Amino acid sequence: EDQVTQSPEALRLQEGESSSLNCSYTVSGLRGLFWYRQDPGKGPEFLFTLYSAGEEKEKERLKATLTKKESFLHITAPKPEDSATYLCAVQGGGGADGLTFGKGTHLIIQP
Amino acid sequence: DTGVSQNPRHKITKRGQNVTFRCDPISEHNRLYWYRQTLGQGPEFLTYFQNEAQLEKSRLLSDRFSAERPKGSFSTLEIQRTEQGDSAMYLCASSPWAQDTQYFGPGTRLTVL
């Protein structure tokens, strides 16, 4: 059974204070690892897809990286509008198309 | 290009009543997914359609739940004899052919009293 564990559960940073969110996963044959951002009361918003170890993707202040066992979402010089819950999900290679999500990291950026 | 839409956005019902939700995927996305999300948890997969065929169902999808996608476009999720434990956000996602990324709608918030 695919499993995703995200840490920390919650993180409070000052504006401009860079940090990283962790996503550890167990999956039989990774097809893809996905990062989403979710604001309160809204659906998840797609950020990145990573497919193989060593892959990196960037978007504005966010950079996602992938190893064989975990992924990191690095946030550089965050702004208050980056405050949200960040969700990590995996899609396994067992023929199932449904995503397995972690519980998310609730990020608060204080001005 | 409009995103995934879901209706209604909010539904309050009494225990034992039936409810139905609708999802309209992004145009030309042939794959459609339903998830359920409770407070403080990540979304949990319920079921998946490729065109009109329902190809995958989670063990979370009890026999009170049924989903359809009759013409391969919009989909409906029906919950019969609702229970308080069914209170959650129901999310729909779609993806295009030969791509793995799933794009989510705004969700339907269900409250069972």
Image: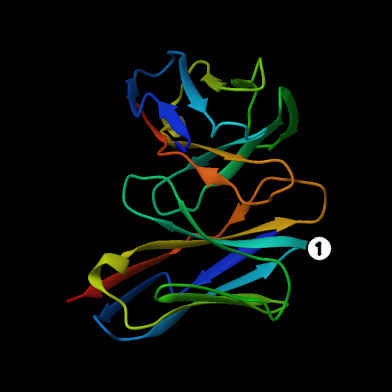
**Residue B29 on image: x %, y %:** 63, 35
Which residue is most to the front? B1
Q: Is residue B105 visible?
A: yes
Which chain is indicated by disc 1? A
Q: Which quadrant of the structure image shows residue A29?
A: bottom right
Q: How many marks?
A: 1
Classify mark 1: helix, strand or loop.
Answer: loop
Looking at this view, is A12 or B69 the one in front?
Answer: B69
Task: Tell whether A3 sits left or right of B107.
Answer: right
Q: Quadrant of residue B11?
A: top left
Q: Is residue A73 above or below residue A84?
A: below
Judge from the rendering whether residue B107 lies leftward or rightward of residue B71; answer left or right.
Answer: left
Image x and y of residue A109, in percent:
26, 74
- Whether residue A41 sits left or right of residue B43 in the image: it is left
Can residue A1 be seen here? The reply is no
Image quarter where the N terminus of chain A lies is: bottom right
Q: Look at label 1 and name its amino acid.
A: Gly
Question: Percent x, y for residue A74?
Answer: 47, 80
Q: Position of residue B75 (x, y in %)?
A: 57, 23
Instruction: Find disc 1 in the rendering and name its residue.
Output: A29
